[in-house]
Amino acid sequence: MFRRGAAAACGPGRQHQSQDQGGDAPCGPDQLILRPYSDDDLSGLLTCWEAAIRSASPKLPERFILTELTNIQQSYLPKVQTTVAENGQIQGFISMLGTEVAALFVHPFEQRMGLGAALLGSQDAQTLEVFEANTRARAFYAKHAFRQTGTRMHEEAGLMLCCMTRAPISS
């Protein structure tokens, strides 16, 4: 399903055209825009998702990835509220189903710079599931106060998922 995690932002060497700077400038989190998903974003979102899922979960069967590319378009996106991060191209996105993180993906070239945290922080996220083998994502979510509350088998992928809930913030 469309419930995996990655983490964070604009990586070294990435460039974008800045109108107010009159040329190429290094990409940074302050130059990214978080905005609601539109149908025009589909291709970029799928490219981002595929790159991130292949990087984070290399043991996923190819048939699963290909099926999910179709499922994202036809089944998942119509049911969720999605926010994209872009600087001319989709760098990452978060999809929410109520307070559940249905998806949080950042392109591998853009990770570990704060974009995942910005996307997660833009939502009232309380629960999620992430592949157990995705230790980087699990560490990212733990850093953002999510605690593992259980596991379950993802039947289609044949891999275990960690169920996580955000710990209440103590006063």
Image (spheres, helix red, strand yellow):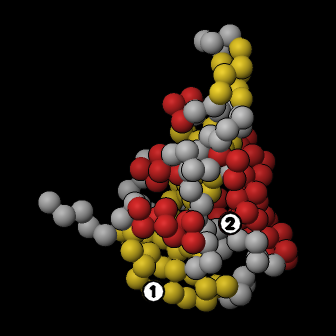
The secondary structure type at the circle numbered 2 is helix
Q: Amino acid at mark 1?
A: Gly
* Relative horizontal placement of residue 78, taking residue 162 as reference (left or right): right
Q: Amino acid at mark 2?
A: Ala
Q: CA distance from mark 1 to mark 2?
A: 20 Å
Vertical placement of residue 70 versus 1, above or below: above
Query: Could you say which quadrant of the image residue 52 lies in?
Result: bottom right
For the point 57% across and 72% down, the residue is 135
The secondary structure type at the circle numbered 1 is strand
Q: Which residue is mark 1?
A: 150
For the point 76% across and 72% down, the residue is 58
Vertical placement of residue 159 versus 126, above or below: below
Tell me the quarter of the image containing the N terminus.
Answer: bottom right
Query: Could you say which quadrant of the image residue 27 lies in?
Result: top right
* Relative horizontal placement of residue 3, taking residue 98 as reference (left or right): right
Query: Could you say which quadrant of the image residue 84 lies in?
Result: top right
Tell me the quarter of the image containing the C terminus.
Answer: bottom left
- Residue 36 seen anywhere in this rendered image of the structure: no
Q: Which residue is mark 2?
A: 56
- Front residue of 127 and 160: 160
